[in-house]
Amino acid sequence: MAEISDFKLTYSTMFDPPPALHQRFDAALARVRASLGRDHPLWIGGRARLAEATFEVRSPIDRDWLIGRFQAGTAQHADAAIAAARDAFPAWAARPWQERVRLARRAAALIEERVYDIGAAVALEVGKNRMESLGEVQETADLIAWYCDQMEANSGFARELPNDPLAGFISRNRTVLKPYGAWVVIAPFNFPFALAGGPIGAALVAGNTVVFKVASDTSLAGWLLLEALRDAGLPDGVVNFVTGAGGELGNALIAHADVAGVTFTGSYEVGMSIVRAFAQRPWPRPCIAEMGGKNAAIVSRHADIERAALGIVRSAFGLQGQKCSACSRVFVERPLADALRAKLIEKTRAIKVGDPTLRENWMGPVINAAALARYRKCAEQLMQHGEIHFGGEVLKRDDLARGYFVAPTIGTAPLDYRLWREEKFIPLVLVAEVDSVDDAIRLANQSDYGLTAGFYGADGEIPAFLERIEAGVTYVNRPQGATTGAWPGYQPFGGWKASGTTGKAIGSFYYLPQYLREQSQTVVE
């Protein structure tokens, strides 16, 4: 086993970490537990701000654990945060891009220095296991560093063009990408650190200023990210942090006339409402929206069944199925169907469910009472309209009774039943038998979503899958995850169809320019 100094943590390598990683996490967990329950402000224009009301965040692992108290920001706070970002924009945009990169790299380094303490906080607040939590925090640092790399590789996105062929004149041409202005970032509960920090890093490196909001359930993650950005030395107003209900605060951010662009990660319904709202403005504004998935794994009769089952279970039940990339549909050719189903049940039965901060537990709770109710309703409906092969129950034994714990669930239903189409964000995977890989690809593509997809089969079957599948991220014969596990610099992550608005992927060569607009410059001497 590698020493920790040689270990590169990614979602692919997280299954075999050095022992020292666990020792450092346990020490950090003790420190973080001792600091829970504090009050946290908003951060606007470089200073702390308080609201008239606050709200509590409690751990989904145990509702007796108070994570902290946070400000119930209002539309007035949205106005103040956007004004601060707008006022800070001219000076920040005018800074040489090399200085912006230097500060962003400092923020990435601070995140990496604090990876264990932040990872422990994320585990407690989100209910992630320790490796998923550490992975998310490290991914954030890598995303910011990646966007710095891209800014450098493209020399700040300024290029000289040929002179116009004019007799008697010298007509010099160039093209420059420039920032937009005050940018809003709205992040979800499942990846509150990476899906805030990644877009923030891209926006800042490009020269935009930022107002960001994470889901209320994961407000501590947002505060810890703000601390790293603040401590890196970013000027006042360049990054502003607000907390509060999406209905008032989030809507006020989106509706504000001074918002130049937005990055949103969350549901299709909310994402499309932002797209429509931006389309009704006096002029169009960029909206980078990642909006979920209903991701399929296809298993041919020639597949390695052990590899396929391992990859499916990891993708279906990692983070309790609360990933936009989670595997929620499996299409398997009939000759292998019984054996695959048995292997999936065997591996699912072996999953240890409990406090995910403990090393022995791989699966933690769902995020809140609404998610628990959604799971219960889906399980009841699946028993009426289909069949549950494993799971389908809320877990209430003594050590789980104060949290939102449910069993990982494998089932089946008629292919026209709505659970095949609707994203539920719970640990539920449906399995269907098909006559051919062609049929499986056709069924996989019937979803409105097109985020990720996996395939297990023979070498000769791979090209057809890659050519025909309608998904932005694809994995073939991957035991580390059938549909999950993208890492910046290794697997760009972005969706097609209803899964995304831009066709460009997080952590790719093409993501950063979305935070910039082009200006053509001609100067005649």
Image (tube, rainbow, N blue to C red):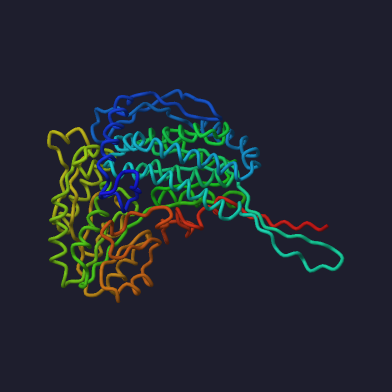
Residue 370 visible somewhere in the drawing: no
Res. 141 image quadrant: top left
Residue ranking furthest to the bottom:
460
Q: Is residue 481 left or right of residue 193?
A: left
Depth check: give the residue in front, 178 or 231. Answer: 231
Q: Residue at position x 30%, y 76% from top? A: 460
Q: Quadrant of the C terminus?
A: bottom right
Above or below, comparing residue 189 to residue 345 in the picture = above
Q: Quadrant of residue 464?
A: bottom left
* Residue 382 placement: quadrant: bottom left
**Residue 231 falls left or right of residue 160:** left
Let me know if residue 41 appears in the view.
yes
Residue 78 higher or lower than 520, as above or below: above
Please tell me which residue is depicted at 42% across the width and 24% down the height of the picture: 53
Tally the numbered discs. 0
Above-or-below relation of 41 to 517: above
Give 350 or 250, whichever is nearer the viewer. Answer: 350
x and y percentages locating residue 387 in the rendered image: 14, 58
Residue drawn 28% across the image and 33% down it: 59
| Residue under the point 25% across and 59% down | 479
Q: Nearer the viewer, residue 34 or 504?
A: 34
Location of residue 155 in the rendering, given as x and y in whole percent from the top left corner:
61, 53
Extreme-right residue of the structure: 168
Name the spot of residue 342 as percent of width and height, x first: 12, 61
Q: Position of residue 217 (x, y in %)?
A: 35, 36
